[in-house]
């Protein structure tokens, strides 16, 4: 599969100043990904003082150019696993031994690119989702709760129908989601396509005898990826829009991650 080359007008550019600001404002002591890189390492390389020395400036410019290439899908396929493969960690949801959530801590480079890609389209996202999806909103769940309380206080003859798709986040159709991103947010497609158009490997340690094993990740979006919530929201937006169209003026739909009301 060839890399996707967007229109030059849609090309995302990441500057040294952007990288420096993100690194300085990010919480420290965050678990690293497979690359073993931490924000603390980059903070030291980019410079901690307002007056940077020439070496720090050179490194910052070169590193920003590298991130720009990744954001625009300009890396050949053999190199892409360095950014899209993850270590797999099981976060247990209950006392049941098999009731767990797989989390894949992404590498710092992927997180930095993802943050820049999302920042470049942030002003469009709210208008696109409108009043259907609140996963990308601050206090989105609270907004949904208050909206329904207000509606029921005005008309108590209405009822609420709440649905939950079992494991929907991890089983979402990536191809459909990529198609929606291509149609509505083409500048973000090269990076998202590089991460999700082909299966990634989720690595986990099974013990000294068998070492590291891998699970192929071909569906859904990786929990731990800064773009995953948005990608999932893009995938289900047409479905929610159709439900909203069917209800018309007799009701409304509001959604946040796996809670549809």
Image (spheres, grey):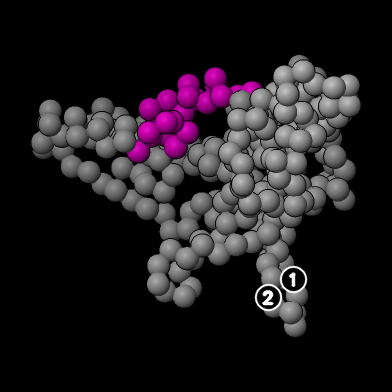
Pointers 1 and 2 in contact (C-beta within 8 Å): yes
SS at circle 1: strand
Q: Residue at x 80, y 50 (%)?
A: 82
**Figure quadrant of the C terminus:** top left
- The spot of residue 44 in percent (x, y) is 76, 35
Q: Which numbered dot is residue 186?
A: none
Q: Nearer the viewer, residue 63 or 13?
A: 63
Q: Residue at x 42, y 74 (%)?
A: 96
Q: Which numbered dot is residue 212?
A: 1
Q: Nearer the viewer, residue 19 or 216?
A: 19
- The spot of residue 15 in percent (x, y) is 76, 22
In primary-sequence order, the first of circles 1 and 2 is 2
Q: Please, is residue 96 above or below residue 172 in the view?
A: below
Q: Nearer the viewer, residue 137 or 171?
A: 137
Q: Quick check: is 137 in the magenta stretch?
A: yes
Q: Please, is residue 189 above or below residue 91 in the view?
A: above
* Left or right of 167, for residue 248: left
Highlighted range, magenta: 120-141
Judge whether residue 5 can be spotted in this image: no
Q: Nearer the viewer, residue 17 or 247?
A: 17
Judge whether residue 196 can be spotted in this image: yes
Q: Please, is residue 166 above or below residue 5 in the view?
A: below
* Marks 1 and 2, how far apart at CA: 6 Å
Quarter-of-image position of residue 17: top right
Q: Residue at x 38, y 27 (%)?
A: 131
Q: Quick check: is 178 in the magenta stretch?
A: no
Quarter-of-image position of residue 219: bottom right
Q: Residue at x 16, y 38 (%)?
A: 158
* Left or right of 14, for residue 147: left
Label 1 crowd (10 A; few <14 / some 14-19 / many >=20): few
Which residue in the protein does label 2 denote?
206
């Amino acid at each position: 599969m060839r890399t996707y080359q967007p229109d030059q007008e849609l090309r995302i550019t990441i500057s040294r100043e952007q990288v420096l600001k993100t690194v300085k404002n990010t919480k420290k002591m965050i678990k690293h990904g497979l690359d073993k890189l931490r924000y603390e390492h980059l903070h030291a390389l980019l410079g901690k003082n307002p007056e940077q020395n020439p070496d720090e400036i050179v490194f910052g410019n070169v590193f920003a150019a590298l991130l720009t290439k990744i954001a625009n899908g300009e890396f050949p396929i053999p190199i892409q696993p360095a950014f899209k493969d993850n270590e797999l960690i099981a976060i247990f949801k209950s006392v049941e031994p098999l009731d767990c959530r797989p989390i894949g801590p992404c590498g710092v480079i992927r997180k930095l690119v993802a943050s820049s890609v999302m920042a470049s389209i942030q002003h469009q996202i709210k208008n696109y989702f409108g009043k259907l999806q609140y996963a990308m909103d601050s206090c989105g769940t609270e907004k949904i709760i208050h909206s329904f309380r207000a509606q029921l206080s005005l008309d108590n003859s209405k009822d609420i129908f709440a649905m939950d798709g079992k494991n929907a986040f991890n089983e979402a159709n990536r191809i459909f989601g990529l198609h929606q991103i291509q149609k509505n947010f083409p500048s973000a497609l090269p990076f998202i396509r590089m991460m999700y158009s082909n299966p990634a490997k989720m690595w986990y340690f099974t013990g000294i005898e068998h070492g590291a094993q891998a699970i192929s990740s071909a569906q859904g979006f990786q929990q731990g990826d800064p773009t995953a919530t948005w990608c999932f929201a893009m995938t289900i937006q047409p479905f929610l829009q159709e439900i909203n169209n069917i209800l018309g003026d007799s009701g409304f739909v509001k959604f946040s991650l796996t809670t549809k009301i």
